[in-house]
Amino acid sequence: MTATPRIVQVDAKPRRKPAVVQLLAEWEYLERSLHRMLCGWGRHFPDWTDKVAVSRHVWDQAECVRRLRERLVQFPGTHKNLETPVSESLEAFGDAVIMAHSLNDAVDGIYQLFINALVKSYLTYAEAAHPIHDAPTLAAISENVRAKEQMRLWLRDYRRRNPGRHSEEYGAKIATALAEANGLMGGLPVDRPAGTIGLNFRPAKRCAHSKNSQPTLDIMPVLECRFKDDLEVRRLFWCYGYLLAMNLAEEQLIWLYDAHEMPWEFQQDVSRHMWDESRHGDSGHSRLLDFGISIEEIGYPYYGGNKTDRPEVAEGAAAILSPKDLYDKVFFIGMVAETGHFHVKHEAYDDFKAGGDLESAEMMLFDIIDETSHVQYAHRWLPLLAERAGIEVDFRAEGAAFRARLQAETTARVDASQGTDHGLAGEKVEKLIARMRAIAPLSNANSCPPRSYKPM
Ligand SMILES: [Fe+2]
Ligand SMILES: [Fe+2]
């Protein structure tokens, strides 16, 4: 076996930057492009476990980018290094991967062809670098490669469940683009700097959801009507409401995709926010499973009640979010929905704890902790989002007015619906809470006083 020759990071030219700075900038660009590919294709996965995994991968990718950015600013040039131009051939390589014609192609393109080339580039440098001088870069590489290992393990599992292989034509296009990009081995001249990949790609308008995930009965009106008076109904509501938060994670993939001109720190925060919402979805799902209730039984409907016979296939192209659209979405989630739910979440936490259901209380508490950060993200970014949208607003005052309006509407709707016969949906709720009671009774189910109305 021959040892890989060392690549000394200093040459005879009069400059004080090691050559690895350029390579770091290229990796940062490639990791950001991979993050974008996952956001672009993430809405195509119908199965719950894949939604959970891909959301995690988006967050892992954000962390990979962050590590490289932190290392880049440690070299001479500091923050200017973050703007180091990289070759357009890297953009062409990324575009060859993201512009797949099918999910089957995209899965291999992203998780195998792109990731393998990137890992090879990392490992080639790691073998040739001075292990003491550039140990901080090697540490970042090692973390990033570990994240890719998790993705490759997921791919293996995905392919066991979804046998298939990418088309030859797609593979050939990627191979050509990779060769043009010198196999990602660095040292490419920059004639025209690379821009954002995938500007001609659109995420799906309607996400894929698993087969049999569309509920035949809508239990939400029942849960809303009985929410304030019935602790057992509130427990079912929270498990189900959390499950539905996966819809928000899926929507946030589009926020990320269309916010590519926002500072990276925004992408970082929204990536965490998106991963958290997918975890809230999975936390509700997991608690329902504790009670023996599956997605097939309770359903994973779309927000807004969209109906389709073929939920397993993602469809259409999402409209591009304008700066105003993005402002509105961040405003509504942060200043209305998230801020507006704290008081009922605290009530649920207290009541589940008092009733002896500590698992459900824990589900509430971890959500409240995450949600506190999410509201901080909204406060952090709404001023810049408003500026980009060209609007002047007092988002705190508008948020309070918006919440008050929704609360008044919900209160009126609930008061008017008292005593209604909810028919089959009402019976279904009765059966579900009876099963939950049999598994984990709440000792205060009958003694708990009425609590707040649902806030919206
Ligand atoms: Fe949430
Ligand atoms: Fe949230």
Image (cartoon, rainbow, N blue to C red):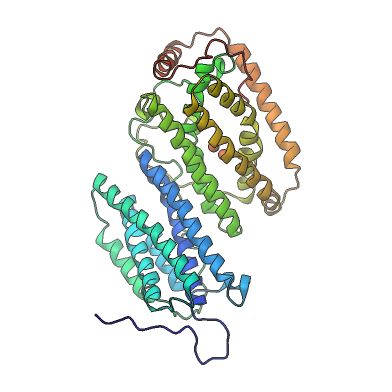
Q: Is 48 or 129 nearer to us in this picture?
A: 129
Quadrant of the image where one finds ligand 1: top right
Residue 270 rendering spot, x and y as whole percentages: 56, 49
| Quadrant location, the C terminus | top right
| Residue 440 at x, y percent in the picture | 43, 20
What is the x, y in percent for residue 21?
52, 76
The reply to whether residue 40 is visible in this rendering is: no
From the viewer's perspective, is residue 59 above or below residue 447?
Answer: below
Name of the residue lying farthest toward the bottom = 12
Q: Nearer the viewer, residue 9 or 275?
A: 9
Give the vertical position of 285 relative to 30 (above or below): above
Q: Residue at x 57, y 27 (%)?
A: 349
State the residue in front, 209 or 277: 277
Residue visible at 36% across and 54% down in the picture:
150
Which residue is depicted at the point 51% across and 39% down?
A: 248
How many labels, in total? Answer: 0
**Position of residue 253 measured from the top left corner of the image (x, y, whole percent):** 49, 48
Depicted 139 relative to depicted 251: above or below: below
